[in-house]
Amino acid sequence: MINSILIVGCGKMGSALLSQWVSGPEAITVVDPMASDLPEKVTLVRDSSEIADERFDCIVAAVKPQMFDDVMPGYAENLADDGYIISIAAGYSAARLSKLMGDKPVVRVMPNLPAAVGRGVSGVVAGPHTADGHMAHAVEFMERAGTVVTVDSEEKLDRVTAVAGSGPGYVFEIARAYAEAAMAQGFSEEEAREMVLGTIGGAIAMASEPGAPSLEDLRNSVTSKGGTTAAGLNALNGDNGLTDRMHATLQACYDRAVELR
């Protein structure tokens, strides 16, 4: 039974997840020298000296991966004998973290930023020494922040990173370019943002309905031969340039994730 959780580091992603994690029954302590404005039920400490020899059922490693070697070993003794570690960091393997922490069980998670509004998509993979109970808790824990995809290897988790972990960045960039093009049509920044985000949100809502047609069929349903949408789509992806660019985007992200690991 997981009753107590220690979160080491609470930056942008950690804070996004924490806002959803607090809906559960566990007692949560955050150690971060810079954190502020945390939920009321969370205990905040500034460094490891403030928790001394206190032990936790789960430790969430949420500092930057380049800090793991220096920071995380200091918390190995704070993990309960039957506890486990969750890592939300890209580019640091579960086996490497497990060894760093004295061969403790590790579950690696790749979340994304919409977790802040309960709409995240997270990949979860079991690392060394992980028991079924650890994975069950990790999946339930992450489901509080959105959708969970369980994968069977860290190689597959790197692919989740390419598609979902980094995905909000692609979407925001597409929306930015879309809004910029709308402003070039004579709309104010506020008008462009409202129209673009409303259009994207409405289209996604349609595609997310139970039993919705395929994405290709949905596209075709708003495209009349020789019409305005067809003209726009031809300019957007008539030469498969957009499709090719998206393939290249995901591949570059995946390659970098592998390189970091």
Image (cartoon, grey):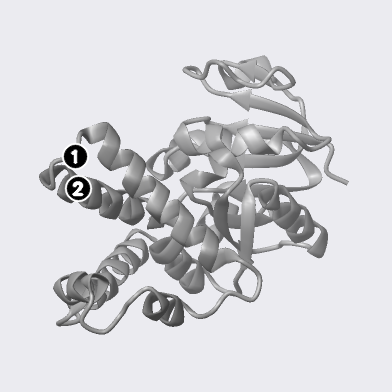
Residue beneath label 1, please? 187
Q: Which mark is residue 182?
A: 2
Element at label 2? helix
Quadrant of residue 64 in the image?
top left
- Asked whether the viewer can see residue 224, the reply is yes
Q: Residues within 10 Å of mark 2 (few under 14, many from 20)?
A: some
Pick the residue in front: 81 or 9: 9
Q: Which mark is residue 118?
A: none
- Give the image location of residue 67, x and y in percent: 42, 38
- Give the image location of residue 175, x and y in percent: 29, 50
- Give the image location of residue 201, x and y in percent: 46, 52
- In the displayed structure image, the side of residue 174 where residue 5 appears, left or right: right
Which three-letter amino acid code belongs to the residue tagged 1? Phe
Which three-letter amino acid code belongs to the residue tagged 2? Ala
Pick the residue in front: 71 or 168: 168
Pick the residue in front: 74 or 157: 157
Instruction: Tell me how far mark 2 sits from mark 1, CA to CA.
Output: 6 Å
- Quadrant (top left, top right, bottom left, bottom right) of the C terminus: bottom left
- In the displayed structure image, the side of residue 114 where residue 65 appears, left or right: left
Pick the residue in front: 58 or 170: 170
Element at label 1? loop
The answer to whether the residues at label 2 and label 1 have Cβ atoms under 8 Å apart is: yes
Q: Earlier in the sequence, mark 2 or mark 1?
A: 2
Residue pictured at 57% horizontal, 32% vertical: 8
- Asked whether the viewer can see residue 91, the reply is no
